[in-house]
Image: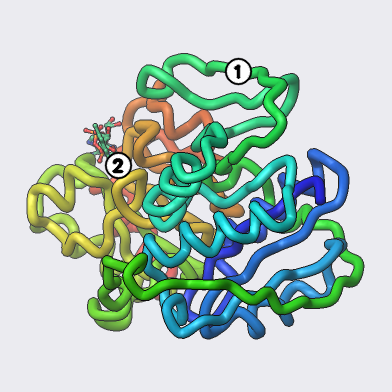
Amino acid sequence: MDILVVLEDNRGTLHRMSKEAIAGAQQIGGSVSALAIGANADALATELFTLDLTEVITVNHELVSSYNADGYAEVVRQVIDSESPKTVIAGHSYQTRDFMPRVSAKLDIPFIPDIISIEGGYTKQVLNAKLNATVNTNVDQIILSFQSAAFSDESVVSGSCSARSFEVNLDPSLVRAESEEPFQESTGDVDLESAELIVSVGRGMEKEENVSLAFDLAKVLGAEVSASRPVVDSGWVEPFRQVGSSGHNVAPKLYFSLGISGAIQHVVGMKGSKNILAINKDPEAPIFEIADYAVVGDVLEIVPKLIEALQS
Ligand SMILES: Cc1cc2nc3c(=O)[nH]c(=O)nc-3n(C[C@H](O)[C@H](O)[C@H](O)COP(=O)(O)OP(=O)(O)OC[C@H]3O[C@@H](n4cnc5c(N)ncnc54)[C@H](O)[C@@H]3O)c2cc1C
């Protein structure tokens, strides 16, 4: 086996970043298989039957029916031991950050996380994304994780594949951690990661009272509201709305960015958006480097007019 992609279960469906990881694996080339773990493993495998993969390996054991780092790390270790993939790949999600270093340590296989490109080596951002570092290696086995939107989930190559169940040998004493319910589920109706339209607010909204403008715009558009970290830290909106490296990874059809500068920690969470419309009064704001539509102006003047126009 050349490449094994470790999949992530996003409440019963395949996580977008797993699909992006498959797209990246297919670009590397060679035989690509996938590993689905947990109570939803068969459902995840079914989602992949129309993709160009060698096979989907499924593992369903009571000790890993839902995610826990100890169990997942041991399952992945056993699959790697048995199948000997040259490269193991996953999306650079919170889950991957949690269990993959344990796999790397258990098997003494190097782990290069948060990769943005595979051209001429494995490239990752360093020094707060001021520089890119390209790593070249000739080790026999390697583990990689791909940054959100490093590859497009739309570039996955179609084909067909089948599923194979893999028996793991798990000792209950190995599984010491127990995961709580996913954070999002306990926070109400807001599902930013599957939202098709998002209105996102940054410190450019200037004060808490102005954030209601974003909610008004979202209501007219039928969008969800998200925010940059300073807005959350100031208590202007709830923490579960935060987008970025310490918040959600989102990929809506349209991301409306209101007064957000475009710092890398924010951008990694939203650059997978299909279209980005940014309003910022600073023409040099970094958000404009990734925006599809750039509006240079004052959000506090533009947004009320936009709401009025959309309503009429
Ligand atoms: C370890 C770590 C993790 C982090 N995680 C995250 C994260 O998950 N998510 C995140 O967002 N950040 C995160 N950050 C913070 C990040 O580095 C930035 O500080 C943050 O994203 C900036 O938020 P902002 O764009 O809202 O504010 P600012 O950088 O202050 O930008 C405000 C923007 O609004 C514009 N503006 C001001 N007034 C107006 C107006 N009236 N009309 C139009 N435009 C206006 C300004 O020109 C400016 O570009 C993290 C930082 C660290 C160190």
**Distance (Cα) linking label 2 and label 1:** 33 Å
Looking at the image, can residue 20 be seen?
Answer: no
Going 61% across and 41% down the picture, which residue do you hit? Answer: 150
Q: Secondary structure at mark 2?
A: loop
Q: Amino acid at mark 2?
A: Gly
Q: Is residue 298 above or below residue 11?
A: above
Going 33% across and 47% down the picture, which residue do you hit? Answer: 258
Q: Residue 160, labelled with which disc?
A: none
- Is 117 positioned to the left or the right of 260 in the image? right
Q: Residue 259 in the image: x percent, y percent?
A: 30, 42
Q: Is mark 2 within 8 Å of ligand 1?
A: yes
- Which is more toward the observer, 169 or 221? 169
Going 36% across and 75% down the picture, which residue do you hit? Answer: 172
Q: Residue 134, labelled with which disc?
A: 1
Q: Residue 236 in the image: x percent, y percent?
A: 11, 56
First of labels 2, 1 by sequence position: 1
Q: Residue 168 is drawn in which quadrant?
A: bottom right
Looking at the image, can residue 151 be seen?
Answer: yes
Q: Nearer the viewer, mark 2 or mark 1?
A: 1
- Is 143 positioned to the left or the right of 308 in the image? right
Quarter of the rendered image showing ligand 1:
top left
Q: Residue 20 in the image: x percent, y percent?
A: 65, 53
Q: Secondary structure at mark 1?
A: strand
Q: Which residue is mark 2?
A: 259
- Which is more toward the observer, 296 or 274? 274
The number of callouts visible is: 2
Q: Amino acid at mark 1?
A: Thr
Q: Residue 44 in the image: x percent, y percent?
A: 64, 77
Quick one: quadrant of the C terminus?
bottom left
- Is 311 positioned to the left or the right of 16 in the image? left
Q: Is residue 181 above or below residue 113?
A: below
